Amino acid sequence: MERLQKVIAHSGVASRRKAEQLIIEGKVKVNGKVIKELGTKVSNSDKIEVTGVQIERENKVYYMLYKPRGVISAVSDDKNRPVVTEFFPEIQERIYPVGRLDYDTSGILILTNDGEFANLLMHPSNEIEKTYVARLKGIPSKFKIRELEKGIKLEDGMTAPAKVKMLSMDKKQEKAIVEISIHEGRNRQVRRMFEAIGHPVQKLKRERFAFLTLHGLNAGEGRELTPHEVKQLRALAETGNLK
Ligand code: URA
C-alpha cells in the first residue's frame, strides 16, 4: 500500500504538494468514493480519479543491480557522489533502491517503482535472507563465530541468530573470509556484528538476496527481474515459502 498523494504525484498529474491540496479539496476519488484524508493508503489495484479523470499508474518495473563499491544507495546525493539509479539511464520509470547497501559495500540491490513490493521486502517480519561475504581483519575463533550464530548484543539490541561459515583464512596475513546470512536489515549491521567480536570488516559484498545471486553480472551491471522472480520474492515475503 502507498500513500494516495505519492501515487498521484508519481503518475505525473501533480506535484506531491498539489496532490495533497487536491485531496483536501475533495477532488480525488478512490474506487468512486471521494477521499479527503491525506494519510489514505491505496493499493496497486485501486482506481484513482483526479478531477474526474482516471490517472495512469506508472508500469511497475523490477530490476537488480550488482552495485559497485563507492556508490550511494539513493536516487540523488547532495555531495554529487554516484548513485545507484545512474546505472539504469534508459529506464523512464522512477525506480529507487529497496533498502540500502553502504557506500563501501558491493553486491545485490533490488530497484523498483513498486512501493508495495519494496515495503513487503523490507519489512523485518518478512525475514528475507541476505548472504554476505566479508573479509575480516584477524581470524575469528570458533567461539566468536558461535556468538554471532546465537545472536550478539549491539547498541540497538540483540541480533537474530545468523548462519556463519568460514570460507578461508590466511594466518600469515591475519585475514579471514567469512560468509554470513542474516534476515534483518539494520544500519551497517554486518559491519557492526563483526566489529562486536573484534574483527572489523575490511571488504563486504552481498552475494545473495533470497534466491537471487549475482550470477552473470559484473559490478555496475544490472538486469530486469523476471515476472517469475518477482512472484517468488513476493510469495517468499508474504508466506515464507516459494511459489
Ligand atoms: N550490513 C552492512 O554492514 N552493510 C551493508 O551494506 C549491508 C549490511
Image (tube, rainbow, N blue to C red):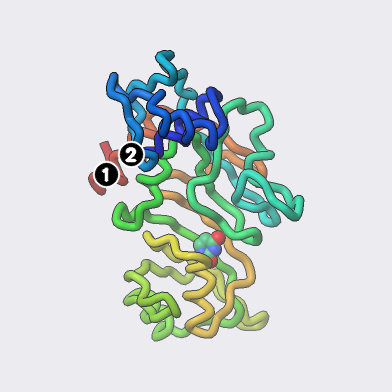
Q: Is residue 133 visible?
A: no
Outermost residue, top side: 53
Residue that mark 1 sits on = 238
Mark 2 and mark 1 in contact? Answer it, CB < 8 Å.
Answer: yes
Outermost residue, right side: 80
The structure residue drawn at horizontal position 35% and vertical position 76%, both measured from the top left corner, is 158
The structure residue drawn at horizontal position 35% and vertical position 45%, both measured from the top left corner, is 120
Give x and y (percent) for residue 59: 47, 23
- Judge by depth and name the residue closer to the eye, 67 or 186: 186
In the image, residue 80 above or below residue 47: below
In the image, residue 125 above or below residue 111: below
Q: How many marks?
A: 2
Where does the C terminus fall, quadrant-wise?
A: top left
In the image, residue 165 above or below residue 232: below
Q: Is residue 138 visible?
A: yes
**Quadrant of residue 49 within the rendered picture:** top left
Label 2 packing within 10 angstroms: few (<14), some (14-19), many (20+):
many
The structure residue drawn at horizontal position 56% and vertical position 56%, both measured from the top left corner, is 101
Give x and y (percent) for residue 50: 43, 20
Where does the N terminus fall, quadrant-wise?
A: top left
Left or right: 69 with respect to 5? right
Circle 2: element type: helix
Q: Amino acid at mark 1?
A: Glu
Q: Amino acid at mark 2?
A: Arg
- Judge by depth and name the residue closer to the eye, 173 or 234: 234
| Ligand 1 contact, mark 1 (Cβ < 8 Å) | no
Residue that mark 2 sits on = 234
Outermost residue, front side: 25
Give x and y (percent) for residue 115: 43, 39
Circle 1: element type: helix
